[in-house]
Image (tube, grey):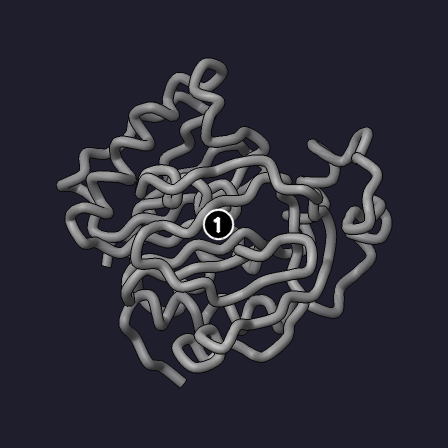
Amino acid sequence: MRIHCLQHVPFESPGYIGSWCDRRGHDLVVTRLHAGEPLPGGDDVEALVVMGGPMGVHDDADHPWMKGEKLLIAAVLEAGKRVFGVCLGAQMIAHASGARVYRNRFQEIGWFPLEATREGVSRLELPRSFIAFHWHGDTFQLPAGAVNVARTDACEHQMFMVGERVIGIQFHLEVMAPDVASMCAHAGHNLPEGPYVQTVDEMRNFTEAYESSHQLMVALLDRWMGERIE
């Protein structure tokens, strides 16, 4: 399948999603919105991945391409196609679905544990707890028809699914060590203080969860694509 990916900034790439596409024989086509590349038409998109970024869903004035992106996401959702959102991408799916996106009480920046909800365990076969990389300060109400499948103490809505074809995650299972290093280099200056914010050194030096994150990403993407591959 031809999977279209929307990338908002150069330092938040598809990461391990590209490796999954190679393994499964899918074509990954990336539109680099930050570089002024034009959006595809809705009819040209078979499946859509929306990546993260430091901007928020309401920052249209600073990023004029966001208006067209929102229309594209809404059109792809309306057509019943597969959409997978990461961090800002999950927030964009929620926003395009009519759900409220707003500032969370806490920012989460670093490697922190998540807890799968009952629905996450039963419907997505998520582990009851797992560690993943976070870099977000906004949260959202669940879109209509969505099920919350993972949470943290800092953010109740960490991951949702709508039916079988739409998944949004606030955290980053796609990152590899160079991705974390790049995010820290570009956005790690003057980090806010808070109970869920690690230092740059802590983020860069923690390596224990990459393998499990990538295994979980493969399982989620297989489920999203309707594939059941061991």
For the residue labelled by badge 1, is the local secondary structure a helix, a strand or a loop?
Answer: strand
Give me the residue at 38% from left, 54% from top. 84
Give me the residue at 41% from left, 28% from top. 33
Give me the residue at 72% from left, 47% from top. 109
- Please state the horizontal and vertical placement of residue 221, each as a whole percent of the image: 39, 66
Between 218 and 94, the one nearer to me in the picture: 94
Q: Quadrant of the N terminus?
A: bottom left
Q: Quadrant of the C terminus?
A: bottom left
Q: Residues within 10 Å of mark 1 (few under 14, many from 20)?
A: many
Please determine whether, in this image, residue 96 is positioned above or below residue 227.
above
Picture mark count: 1
Please determine whether, in this image, residue 37 is positioned above or below residue 24.
above
- Residue 111: name its quadrant: bottom right
- Please state the horizontal and vertical placement of residue 112, each as a whole percent of the image: 72, 60
Question: Which residue lies most toward the top here?
Answer: 61
Q: Which residue is mark 1?
A: 86
Question: Which residue lies most toward the bottom here?
Answer: 230
Give me the residue at 67% from left, 40% from top. 183
- Please state the horizontal and vertical placement of residue 85, each as a whole percent of the image: 42, 50
- Please state the horizontal and vertical placement of residue 51, each as a whole percent of the image: 46, 44
Please determine whether, in this image, residue 200 is positioned above or below residue 131.
above
Q: Amino acid at mark 1?
A: Val
Left or right? Give the position of 53 relative to 83.
Answer: right
